[in-house]
């Protein structure tokens, strides 16, 4: 018989509310709240999290219905060992809906122990909406709500320097903290007249005594385990309807704010001391480039190459005798050579990435990666192609073959094993490729794709040797098939 999950049926720790978290979704609960839980267990961090529902419809009621208790199921490989763990997370004290509990939301500003604000309001969440007003209950945008809260705190504590907050956004945009800070300054200007005599003082307090970090987060979180939920509930003996599943790997890079040192931030947020993969760094940029280049970059080219070779799952592609070597070549011999971090560090990261690609618990379909392949190639692989050419004086064959594979995939038709190839993309890209393939002329196809300004914002035919190499690969794929073409460059 399963028990209901709440604080009467399961132990729940009690710690001061020190973190306000905007967002109650799977990612934050599996990543940030799991990190806080580990910090509480392994250091004297001693903090609980108040969750704020950032949009009108959300999960606050669901969370409160289980007294904010839930299980995290981590699966995957870590250092060669298979991991399949189940932990009950108890760090969320309560969930607040600012649309129905605005007083309770604004009262968070008055709690002296609050020190951190963490958020994941999706990429669209960090945006300035000039329609927001200071006396809205609440402001519709996330930065608007945050500015309301910060102003209340400034007023209640009379601009006390020790009551500033550390803001750590987790939205998946580069330099997320810089964007958030900019939005808050826009609201301070917009509401200047409402602040009246407080305007200068509040602006200075926010500038000097609040600390805004840019961060990079990395953990794949599939979310609610629909397939295994019965089995998980029987294992934990609770009727937990908020189980969240994620991969075993985690990485959080936190760029130190301008007005705080690395050591000061480490002392306040002792994640590293807790043995977690949390790096507090001078700059997030090299780590952002490393992730985009060594994780997303190989994904983008391995997918069409694997699919056209008859391989459907990322794990199987990595373990394939030919495609596996192709992935290794693209990662280690080509993309890794274009980055500016220590080689040892890059090799460690690449090893972690490959371990994640072969996760025995996740059947990652290569076709799910192939939506919008050209724009992905432009941001993830093209910069590496150019740097490689500049540094080595030749084109990286694996990356160019990946581009030819994308062009071939968009031809459609039937795979060698009889499976129908059904590309899916923006109508204008689909039409462009359809028209080019109708010519049957490989040079026209290559030249037409490489010249397309709407994809590349430049004419890639200007890159020395690229057009000829793409034409060569297109012809070889048509004549010999994908797998034979891959073998020819290894």
Image (spheres, rainbow, N blue to C red):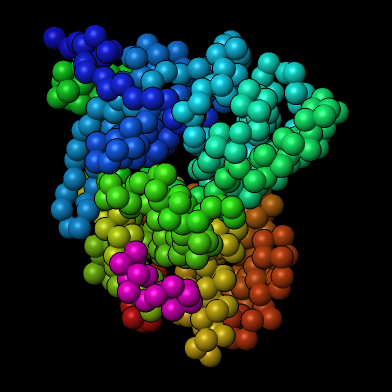
Residue 489 location in percent, x, y? 38, 81
Q: Say if residue 465 shows up in the picture.
A: yes
Q: Residue at x 50, y 56 (%)?
A: 261
Q: Residue at x 61, y 73 (%)?
A: 446
Residue 151 location in percent, x, y? 68, 28
Q: Horizontal placement of 453 versus 14: left or right?
A: right
Q: Residue at x 83, y 27 (%)?
A: 196
Quadrant in the picture for residue 75: top left
Q: Residue at x 46, y 28 (%)?
A: 113
Quadrant in the picture for residue 347: bottom left
Residue 448 location in percent, x, y? 68, 70
Vertical order, 200 against 50 (above or below): below
Residue 114 location in percent, x, y? 49, 29
Q: Horizontal placement of 96 versus 443: left or right?
A: left
Magenta stretch, residue numbers: 334-350
Please identify the residue farthest to the bottom as the structure is shown.
393
Say how many tags the image has. Answer: 0
Vertical order, 346 against 260 (above or below): below
**Between 132 and 256, which is closer to the camera in this rendering?**
256
**Between 109 and 141, which is closer to the camera in this rendering?**
109
The overriding secondary structure of the stretch rendered in magenta is helix
Please identify the residue farthest to the right as the structure is shown.
193
- Residue 36 in the magenta stretch? The answer is no
Vertical order, 385 against 116 (above or below): below
For the C terminus, the image quarter is: bottom left
């Amino acid at each position: 018989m399963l028990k209901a999950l709440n604080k009467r049926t399961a132990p729940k720790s009690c710690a001061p509310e020190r973190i306000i978290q905007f967002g109650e979704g799977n990612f934050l609960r599996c990543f940030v709240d799991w990190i806080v839980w580990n910090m509480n267990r392994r250091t004297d961090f001693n903090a609980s999290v108040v969750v704020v529902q950032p949009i009108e419809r959300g999960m606050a009621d669901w969370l409160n219905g289980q007294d904010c208790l839930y299980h995290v199921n981590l699966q995957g490989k870590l250092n060669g060992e298979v991991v399949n763990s189940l932990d009950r997370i108890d760090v969320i004290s309560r969930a607040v809906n600012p649309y129905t509990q605005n007083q309770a939301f604004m009262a968070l500003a008055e709690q002296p122990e609050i020190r951190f604000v963490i958020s994941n309001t999706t990429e669209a969440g960090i945006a300035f909406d000039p329609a927001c007003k200071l006396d809205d209950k609440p402001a519709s945008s996330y930065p608007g709500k945050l500015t309301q809260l910060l102003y209340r705190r400034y007023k209640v504590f009379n601009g006390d320097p020790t009551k500033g907050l550390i803001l750590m956004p987790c939205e998946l945009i580069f330099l997320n903290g810089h964007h958030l800070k900019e939005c808050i300054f826009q609201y301070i200007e917009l509401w200047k007249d409402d602040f009246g005599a407080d305007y200068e003082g509040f602006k200075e307090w926010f500038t000097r005594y609040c600390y805004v970090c840019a961060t990079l987060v990395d953990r794949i979180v599939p979310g609610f385990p629909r397939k295994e939920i019965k089995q998980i509930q029987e294992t934990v003996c609770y009727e937990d309807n908020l189980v969240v599943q994620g991969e075993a790997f985690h990485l959080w890079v936190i760029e130190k704010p301008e007005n705080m040192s690395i050591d000061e931030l480490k002392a306040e947020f002792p994640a590293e001391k807790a043995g977690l993969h949390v790096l507090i760094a001078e700059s997030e940029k090299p780590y952002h480039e490393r992730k985009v280049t060594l994780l997303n970059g190989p994904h983008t080219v391995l997918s069409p190459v694997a699919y056209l070779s008859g391989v459907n799952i990322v794990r199987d592609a990595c373990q394939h005798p030919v495609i596996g070597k192709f992935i290794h070549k693209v990662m280690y011999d080509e993309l890794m050579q274009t980055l500016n971090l220590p080689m040892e560090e890059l090799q460690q990261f690449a090893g972690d990435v490959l371990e994640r690609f072969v996760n025995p618990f996740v059947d990652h379909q290569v076709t799910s990666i192939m939506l919008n392949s050209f724009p992905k190639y432009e941001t993830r692989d093209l910069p590496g192609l150019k740097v490689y050419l500049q540094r080595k004086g030749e084109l990286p064959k694996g990356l160019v073959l990946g581009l030819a594979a994308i062009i071939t995939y968009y031809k459609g038709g039937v795979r060698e094993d009889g499976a129908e190839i059904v590309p899916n993309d923006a109508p204008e890209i689909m039409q462009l490729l359809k028209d080019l393939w109708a010519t049957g002329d490989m040079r026209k196809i290559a030249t037409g794709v490489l010249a397309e300004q709407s994809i590349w914002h430049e004419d890639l035919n200007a890159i020395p040797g690229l057009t000829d190499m793409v034409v060569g690969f297109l012809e070889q794929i048509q004549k010999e098939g994908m797998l034979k073409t891959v073998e020819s460059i290894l």
